[in-house]
Amino acid sequence: MSVVRVEHLQLNYERDAQRVEALRGISFDVNAGERVAIIGRSGGGKSSLMRVLSGLLSPSAGTVEAAGFRMEAGRLPPRAMYEQVGLVFQNYGLVPQLSALQNVLCGRLLHQRSASSLLHFPGEDRDQARALLEELGLGERLHTRSSRLSGGEQQRVAIARLLHQNPRVMLLDEPIASLDVHWARMAIERLAGGGPQSAERALIMVMHDLNMARQFATRVIVLHHGEILFDGDPDQGCRLLEELESRDATDGEVEIAVNEAAADATAPSDASAPAPLPIDGLWGKTSFYVVLMLLIAGLYIWSAMGVDFSVARIFGNADHAANFLSRMLPPDFSVSANVGKSLLETVQMALIGTTLAAIVSLPIATLAARNISARPFQVVARLILNLLRTIPSIIWGLFFVAIVGLGPFPGILALTFYAAGYLGKFYYEGIESIDPRPLQALRTVGATPLQRFRFGVFPQVLPLMLGYTLYMLEYNVRAASILGVVGAGGIGFYLYTYINNFQYDRAATALLFLLAVVTVLDAASSRLRARLAG
């Protein structure tokens, strides 16, 4: 019974403004119980074929059916297909921040209700995932982050995820490239299954190890420049590829020799004389940097003249600065109780405001990210974030004081709105920088968009998000200290009062308290960010 049918498949795409024909009218069928090895030289179209069969790429022309599901140009296959079709990626497709066990459990996402799977997996699925990892020699690495596993261990985790998915059609893109002989043999035997399972399951494997192809494949397809060169007996197919590689290597040596001879024939008589260097034109590399530096220098000169910038005025009034500092020293610590209480209020405002900003900005950032959101949502979300950042926190403070009255509450709202604009920008830039390959792998296990965000996007971006949030907390402590000027609570009220009353020694006490808190927060957040990055 045919479980995979390919007829006149063509795959074309654009690269560097040129049309590339990756697959050229190939046709073949795969029956249940077959183990087909796809072999060929690099660039022959093997990985492209696997991506078409898995639904990650749409065919340009022709017919492709896998487990009864037809691939159509420009349309994604239904999620239900991935109950029958699974793929092990050449790069494994693991989420680096998830443990080995969590990555394997992702193979069951199609079978879970989206909402419940965001929090936990059933005990039966966890037991089966644990058993698969133990069977593949990873019993002691269950809770190790995938990024800390070796290449061979990551490949075994990817195989365990496919086994947990348990599809009828298994697509394997170099499934044993990082495995030693023992684990390679065990992995192939485990994937092939035993008893009735082996008769129902079809394996299509991209393989570079021809000995393994001879041993485990029941059939070999040789792909060469996007076309099927051979389809049949494994030993004959492997010999054909070996002859092809040997002939191409010989032709390559002859071509190199001919090129070297031609170069010798046309070489100048004085080979030691250096070739003349090309003279850079007006827009050559050297001229470009000279012009760029002149433009930058001119920009700074223009800016300094426009704002009446003067170094002499800075150092020429040093006596005024000394007089001001002398009036601040020594600090008057008699106001420590009031200053300390207001400083605690400042920290509380910053903590609540930053937390609310993180909660508000995350969904907006998700809609603003180019790699996971549609264009209309991106435009609206980025416009909102730009608006939030445009208005300074002190203006937000004035706005909310007018609405809800004096005190720390309007200050919290001001910090929330202002910080949300910056955190949203930081978050969506972090989301846009994630590795897209785990998201593709999650698609091939039938994960919903919400599941892909939970298990593919969020774990990757979480360390960055926490780092940015801690940075924003430090900033908000400083920003909250100025909101008291407009009656929005915090230590800023005392700073404003002391300076207006020329009580600079008391203002110095408030600044020292603020410096101590900011220093402690900076040290703590730096250590925490280092732990998160590790």
Image (cartoon, grey):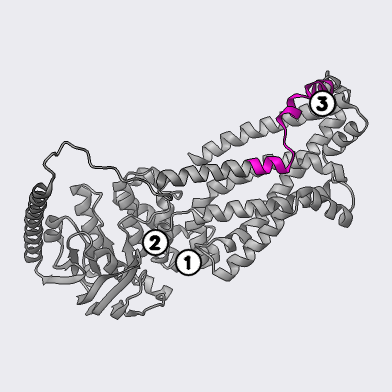
Disc 2, SS: helix
Residue at 82%, 40% in the rendered image: 490
State the residue in front, 223 or 352: 223
Q: Residue 428 in the image: x percent, y percent? A: 57, 56
- Can you tell which mark lies on residue 54? none
Q: Residue 278 in the image: x percent, y percent? A: 31, 46
Q: Report which quarter residue 129 is drawn in.
A: bottom left
Whether residue 64 is visible, yes or no, is yes
* The magenta segment: 301-325
Whether residue 144 is visible, yes or no, is no
State the residue in front, 64 or 214: 64
Quadrant where the N terminus is found in the figure: bottom left
Disc nearest the viewer among 1 and 2: 2
Disc 3 marks which amino acid? Ala
Crowd tier of the residue under label 2, counting other residues whose Cα lies within 10 Å: few below 14, some 14–19, many 20 or above: many
Q: Residue 255 in the image: x percent, y percent? A: 9, 55
- Can you tell which mark lies on residue 112? 1
**Magenta span contains residue 525:** no
Disc 3, SS: helix
Disc 2 marks which amino acid? Ala
Q: Which residue is mark 3?
A: 508
Q: Which residue is mark 2?
A: 441
Establish if 68 lies above or below 351. Answer: below
